[in-house]
Image (cartoon, grey):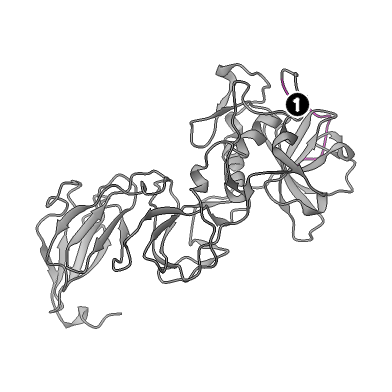
Amino acid sequence: MRRGDPGDRCTPAGGRWARLRSPRGWGVLVASVGLAVPGAVLGSATDGSSASASTSGKAITRDEIMVRAKDWYDRRSSLTYSNSRAASALLPDVEGDQRYRRDCSGFVSMAWHLEPGRSGGLNTSSLPDVSTKISRSKLRAGDLLNDRVDGHVILFAGWETDKVHFSFYSFGRTPIQLVKGASFEDSRWSGWPSGNYVALRYRHVRDQVSPGPGTHVVAVGDVTGDGGADLVARDGQGTLWLYPAARDVAGRPVLFERVRIGVGWKDLMPLVGDVTGDRRADLVARDRTGVLWLYTATGKRVPDEVVAGRVRIGAGWKGLTPVLADLTGDRRADVVARDGAGVLWLYAATGKTSSGEVLSARVRIRAGQEFRNRP
């Protein structure tokens, strides 16, 4: 869309289209950093605020760009093309707090998490103002191919295995298309001459997030409450970090930029489970004096606000080995602990978050030698 136009001139002549099947389910979380299991050592770091909750117009990871694009693509059956700038015609993004125009440049403005303004995003003339021109050979997932001549823009989704063909998103008509098998040899993309497209890279884009040297995964759970298995990791300084997880357009698990949970966790080993029953995994940790604490997940992806202030569960846990599991079937993670004599105890979660009321009085589950030596 060009500056001054009421909307995109995106509707193409007939073209070749193909859809990629959107992934279902989650399975085991594997990312470029390796298998996400407690104790895994992660790679080098990138500091900053959460990519999954990036601020509009600020830094954003490629992973989040693609997850944001996929959100609209997954809603394509109920999403019709419109270049209207009317407030009632704009569509919310995945967080629901920004609304964008339902056309090609509105779609990429949403994916890049740009400030939508009153018009619901930038256009094909103004997108270069927040971008850097790159060669086509340098294109990576999350970059753009922008056609200012015809007023159309497409979101580059990634190279295929042969490194010659690629896939891209296009919202020039209903529904949003995810095209694969495209190449630079094609005469037209989305119905417009391929020679008119210029490769652009967002100035604030960040590459794949990788955690810091010596950082260890200490727990895995859905802390954010979005259905994905997030990572909780601790660095060598005792700072605890959350790495929100999602899947990219190809169904591959990815990690967003880390968010600081808090400092002072060097001597604490958190357990992760939904103790409160709100479908967000809370943290439970025992300190050196044997006091057990609850850190309720807030659902926020803001540094130092991932969990609420700690609540004292109780003292006397120094000689106990606790784990979290929903033994009572009420969708709340109970605490199961083994004492030094090999007796197993159940502390059922109450759903309360007041000090001394988080767990019910313990109930003996089973005693015997068999619990002592199990790995």
When the figure is inspected, residue 67 is found, relative to residue 47, above or below; the finding is above
- In what quadrant of the picture does the C terminus appear? bottom left
Residue found 75% across the figure and 43% down from its top: 132
Residue 21 colored in magenta in the image:
no
Q: Badge 1, how many Cα within 10 Å: few under 14, some, many 20+?
A: many
Dominant SS of magenta comes to loop
Residue found 28% across the figure and 49% down from its top: 296
Residue found 82% across the figure and 49% down from its top: 136
How far from the left and from the top, in percent, is residue 2? 77, 25
How far from the left and from the top, in percent, is residue 290? 17, 67
Q: In this view, does 23 lie to the left or right of 274?
A: right
Residue found 57% across the figure and 46% down from its top: 64
How far from the left and from the top, in percent, is residue 184? 86, 48
Which residue is nearer to you in this view: 214 or 299?
Answer: 214
* Residue underneath mark 1: 1
- In what quadrant of the picture does the N terminus appear? top right
Which residue is nearer to you in this view: 311 or 248?
Answer: 311
Residue 162: which quarter of the image? bottom right
Residue 175: which quarter of the image? top right
The kind of residue tagged 1 is Met
Which residue is nearer to you in this view: 263 or 171?
Answer: 263
How far from the left and from the top, in percent, is residue 340? 14, 78
Q: How many labels does the image show?
A: 1
Q: What stretch is highlighted in magenta?
A: 7-17
Residue 218: which quarter of the image? bottom left
